[in-house]
Amino acid sequence: MYFNRELSWLKFNERVLNEALNTHLSVMERLQYNAIFSSNLDEFFMVRVASIKEQMKAGYQVEDDSGYTPERLFEEIHQEVTQMIDLQHRLTDDLLDALKDEGIKLVRQEAFDEALLEQMAAYFKKELSPVLTPMAVDISRPFPVVKNKDLYIACKLLVSNEHKLALVQVPSSLDRLVSFKTEDHYEYVLLEDIIMTFLGQLFNGNEVIDSSVMRLTRNGDLDFIGDNADDLLMVIEEAVKKRQDGEPIRLELSDTCDQWIVDQLKEIYNLPNSQLYSIPGIMDLTLWFDFKGNLGDHRRVSKYKPRKMPYMHKKDIFRTLSDEDVFIHHPYESFDYVVDFVKQASKDPNVLAIKQTLYRIDGVSSIVKALGKAAAAGKQVTVLVELMARFDEENNIEWAKKLESKGVHVVYGVYGYKTHSKITLVVRKEGKSIKRYVHLGTGNYNSKTAKRYTDMSYLTSNEDFGEDASQFFNMIFGFTNAIETEELSVAPFGLREKIYELIDNEIKQVHHGHEGSIIAKMNSLVDKEVIDKLYEASCAGVKIHLIVRGICTLVPGVKGQSENIIVKSIIGEFLEHSRIYCFQNGHHPQVYLSSADLMTRNLDYRIELMFPVLDKHVSNRIQQTLKLYLGDNIESWYLDEHGDYYQSEMRDKWVCAQEILKSIDYDDDKSFVRALQGKF
């Protein structure tokens, strides 16, 4: 009845890797997908595989809902990942050949000629050698701490007729791809290849028998929970520092690595073969994130420029919101409008208070700076900074301290829950009354990711939303562990029940002879109880279309269980991140946006928000956008009952949702619907 969560995630990452096969993209864009695949895999091992390893250590033998024990799942992951790595490196070889046609040649050790070696020797002596530190291992020099995900050269030395192990760290402060000018073109060499070429100069008097690039991935989950912690900020700071010392989960070695080196490292880290991964090419392909090269602008990764919203410039934001709700679809429409909302609030003398939740913040956050200025101007500014945003802890700690230094009242999350909701409340004095303005979103207050993720923002001055927002902030800033609201559904205090209620209503519609229909778009679908409720709806005759980008443990298309459920995934230029839940409700569709995926962690262990789209024109626009997503046949993958994904080969008309949304021209939400209907 359920697919395995981890194996489903691997299927998602395989779909990401398949984008590297897309010949309609530039070579650099295809290499970017290669890098995304590697980055995703790193986090998967640091969190999910580490969790399975913890279960194995604890002797946990119970099968999960998909029938896997931790041991069996661990072995299955090793097999699947090994096959994907082989595919990734075959793709990489093809892409490197294609790069040559662009005038970029990556030269590996076996192909170094005299002219290149001469330039490399000068670079090694002048710039590289002073940074390197050879680390021998013997009785007086214990094995050094190997940092998480950093590259090292593992060396087999002959010292006094005895084999000895030594390490050299590849410095992350230097460019990984070093360029050398030869005749009329550039040649690039990997930093680790330069080091291995001149290793003898680091170990004078000893013979270097062999060497290999190695990379260790450690358990990245923070282990710090303690009821007696007086200062959560300090506790998390310490836990983040210890992440580099986490238990080894994966050891990557070059496939040409000397067996003696392999055996030494296996013994040092006490690793079985199921935690070793042999890499048949370049180690750590996230290097393509930072590579610029000598490409012309037309050959680089394309950067889409969001369209302007004409009606947002006619009045100031508060006058606009007093007249109508505003909907923004990122990245097609600029995130700057959300930033401007906070900026205007920080400068407006009539604004009395600003309250906001922050989950993932970009490194140069204009929003955070505006909040600091608002506090300095005497406004009451209260912000919840979620310190437990995984792998963003250090960044959020830094911003929290800066906010506090500016006079902002900062709360470090709600104890026992992770605050994942995206909401801003602005309280403004207008005449003799107080008016509240609210921003709600499906994505983070992060200008950087807003250019690459598809998300939706909703701005309103609706009184019920304003009152609910006040109640919400009273809950998270105070000691309240319950909340009553008119429009907002809040996890874990009722969002799950609201989802059930909406699904049950579609079942009731079918029983009354009406059509029952659900269209839901999310990142992941994992929660067993929600899946069972969707199965119930399917059996009752409700037509269900699910657009699930990543993990999906629901099994579609099974007679007597899910024959009315279709699941698809869209993988394109932008990462599909918005969460949209649409229920037909007879002839009166109900559209909801949310920060929450349908995962147990979101519904039970996080502070999340789901809210209805009350404006009719905005609701119609979102419904049409969902229909466009359902009609996409270019970047879509369909899930079958066996857990495999396939792309449709039947195309009467080519429909690419992201490309259409990039090209559409409109003046307002009504004209958007007309323009979209004209294209699709």
Image (cartoon, grey):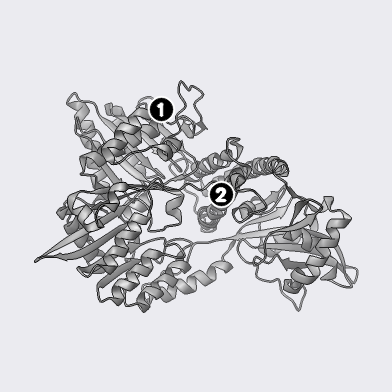
Crowdedness of circle 2 by 10 Å Cα count: few (<14), some, many (20+)? some
Q: Nearer the viewer, mark 2 or mark 1?
A: 2
Decide which of 524, 263 is in the foreground and name it: 524
Residue 609 appears in view: no
Q: Residue furthest front?
A: 314
What kind of residue is marked 1?
Answer: Gly
Vertical order, 50 against 593 (above or below): below
Decide which of 82, 674 is in the foreground and name it: 674
Vertical order, 678 against 171 (above or below): above
What kind of residue is marked 2?
Answer: Ile
Give the quadrant of residue 398: bottom left
Residue 183 appears in view: yes
Q: Where does label 1 land, which residue?
A: 557
Q: Quadrant of the N terminus?
A: top left
SS for dot 1: loop
Give the quadrant of residue 144: bottom right
Q: Residue 65 in the image: x percent, y percent?
A: 43, 42
Crowdedness of circle 1 by 10 Å Cα count: few (<14), some, many (20+)? some
Q: Residue 68 in the image: x percent, y percent?
A: 50, 43
Q: Residue 483 in the image: x percent, y percent?
A: 20, 58
Taking 187 as reference, is 113 left or right?
Answer: right
Give the quadrant of residue 270: bottom right
SS for dot 2: helix
Q: Residue at x 74, y 67 (%)?
A: 167
Q: Quadrant of the C terminus?
A: top left
- 3D distance between C-alphas at marks 2 and 1: 31 Å
Taking 204 as reference, is 224 left or right?
Answer: left
Q: Where does label 2 land, which residue?
A: 36
